[in-house]
Amino acid sequence: MTRFLKPLSMIYNEKSGFHATQNDDIYEQLMTIWSEHGFEIQVFDLASEPNIQTLMQKVLTRHQQFNDVGVIVAAGGDGTLNAVASQLLHQDIPLGILPLGTFNYVARVLNIPLDLLAAANVIATGEPRLSHVAKINDQIYLNNASLGLYPLFIKKRELYNQKFGRFPLHAYTSGLDVLIRDRKELKLEIDVDQKRYPVKTPLLFFGNNQLQLKEMNLKIAQCAALGEVAGVILAKTDKLSLFKTLVQLIRGKLEQAADVYSFSGNLVNVYSKKATLTVAIDGEIKEMSTPLHVHVEKNALKIMVPYDSASV
């Protein structure tokens, strides 16, 4: 059946507490804003299906019943945004963002307001812009992917969040905790555009979001903006050196830290003697088979942004 309204499908994670009592008023205002702009709205919980592929197939089938492609909205933090975006690569349907995360780097780099009602207006009245999406094996990352200490930071941060609530400070206190208690050295070979380098490192970091890289004062931010793989390697593993690096990270001067090396390229392969490596992808922990293949799919994702926003 052909419909003349525009479809809007909002996907959220019930665990985020978005439907908690204190958010009922905001939720109703969101529905009002979108309805007034001619959208027919349906809401989907990530947990309603066994996996994101099954859920998104249901959502995409819904949108095919309309004349207008509409918009698919991800309401949540980096994990929710990553899951939805992974199924929208090279699709005509744009992604709308309701930023409910701690840092909201993707929203911020696209000038999407962090206020939910303002963000809802952008979804309704903005324009789709193309963004670069990085991939490590078959997993996308919109912000970053990392090996070594960073996955340990993520696990520790979640423990802090569960005990004390979600605050940006916990990203740093958890990092300090890991440096004191846990340290890992990875023995890798990294191939950057067919030039291979042996590496021993406690941390290998890939960034796709130029705002996040700029806030670290990393020169490779421009490389990410151009659609290249942008990476950072730490060369020392002793506790004092790592502590100094953490201090520089907190100060936004990571580029000035000793033994921090950045690189960029079109294709990066990471080799290890281990069959799998633990990788943190946009804040979610994954076990991935080696070798790891990293590249950027340019202009792969449409995102609704304000009219005066620059694309990435």
Image: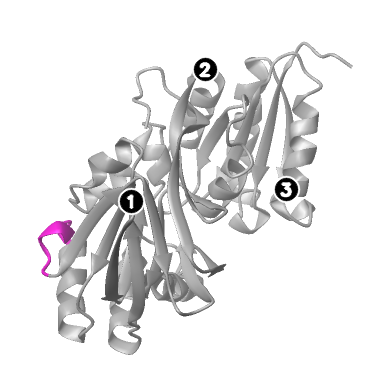
Label 1: state its secondary structure.
Answer: loop
Q: Residue furthest right?
A: 1
Residue at which label 2 appears: 125
Q: Which x, y percent locates residue 298?
A: 44, 34
Give neighbour class at mark 1: few <14, some 14-19, many 20+ (Cα, 10 Å).
few
Observer able to see residue 31: yes
Residue at which label 3 appears: 53
Magenta range is 251-258
Q: Which x, y percent locates residue 76?
A: 55, 48
When the figure is inspected, residue 253 is found, relative to residue 5, above or below; the finding is below
Mark before the other along the chain sequence, 1 or 2: 2
Would residue 32 be counted in the magenta stretch? no
The residue depicted at 78 percent of the width and 52 percent of the height is 48
The residue depicted at 40 percent of the width and 65 percent of the height is 270
Q: Which x, y percent locates residue 87?
A: 64, 42
The three-letter code of the residue at mark 2 reads: Thr
Q: Foreground residue, 54 or 154?
A: 54
> Marks 1/2: CA distance?
41 Å
Mark 3 or mark 1, which is nearer to you?
1
The three-letter code of the residue at mark 3 reads: Gln
Residue at which label 1 appears: 193
The three-letter code of the residue at mark 1 reads: Asp
Mark before the other along the chain sequence, 3 or 1: 3
Label 2: state its secondary structure.
Answer: helix
Q: Foreground residue, 189 or 120?
A: 189
